[in-house]
Amino acid sequence: MKTQFLAFVIALAPFSLVFSQSPAGSSYFQAVEEYKLRNYPKSIELLKGLQSEGKATFESYALLAYNYDKLNDFENAYGSIQEARKRKPDDENLAADTLGILAKYKKWKAVIELSEKFVPLFPTNAEIRYFYSLALSEKGAGKVALSQIEKAKSGNANDVRFLELEGKIYYLLKNYDKADMSLRWASSLNEKSASIWNNLALVQEALYRQNLKLGKKKDAVGYLEEAKECIQKAENIDSNDSSVKENHKRIHSITNS
């Protein structure tokens, strides 16, 4: 039986400081506007001009990194965010975005190594804890990741990302009851996420099979019905996702008999 959890989407959210200050005059503002208009090459051109004039700042290097990230250019995105951090090493937003770029390109070992430096420096930063937990889970250290998630949730109890990641880890550890609890909580906070409904459907499917083996047919049937409802919600939200389609077909082919 092949089941597919939906992959976690890594998207950088450029911090407001980049757009609220004017470190290098009108060229920087123009670069910001071009970025907002998704004209990334033009924004890069303007920012490169600031560099050639000796007017580059941590904000301009950060914006350069976000532009390259949008163009899926890892080398330049990572190099630029590093240049930004050299100019402001104590900025936790830049630290988090550095991890975000690495995570997007699945550089899990590097994420873990940097996170181990960043977490003690910025212990309350949820973004940093999230990327650390995600990298740990991707490298098979699920239990360690769960401990990081628990620490993060103490100050961010309703952060859907942590709940969804927690649910996935519990699922992989075959602790389906806890996975069910985490993903139900996540779905109550975000009812429009195809990935949450898809993943919750897989947990319900696992609980169905588990209860069927234990001879608890009535409970099993209930879980199966929930699995079908959840995967239908996922397909209603994103009918083009191949994993959702595959899971929908498999789950709806299961009979109660």
Image: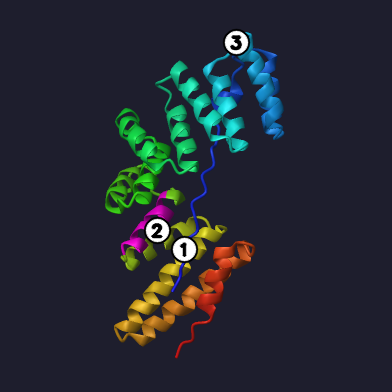
Q: Earlier in the sequence, mark 2 or mark 1?
A: 2
Circle 1 residue = 199
- Residue 119, compared with residue 134, is above or below; it is above
**Residue drawn 32% across the image and 66% down it:** 174
Quadrant of the image for the N terminus? bottom left
Q: Around disc 2, counting alpha carbons within 10 Å, would you say few (fewer than 14), some (14 to 19), or many (20 or more)?
A: many
Magenta residues span 162-173
Looking at the picture, which amino acid does disc 1 mark? Asn
Q: Nearer the viewer, mark 1 or mark 3?
A: 3
Looking at the picture, which amino acid does disc 2 mark? Lys
Circle 3 residue = 55
Residue projecting furthest to the bottom: 257
Looking at the picture, which amino acid does disc 3 mark? Lys
How far across and how far down the image is residue 161, in percent?
45, 49
Locate residue 202: give its quadrant. bottom left
Q: Predominant secondary structure in magenta?
A: helix
Is label 1 in a helix, a strand or a loop?
A: helix
Is label 3 in a helix, a strand or a loop?
A: loop
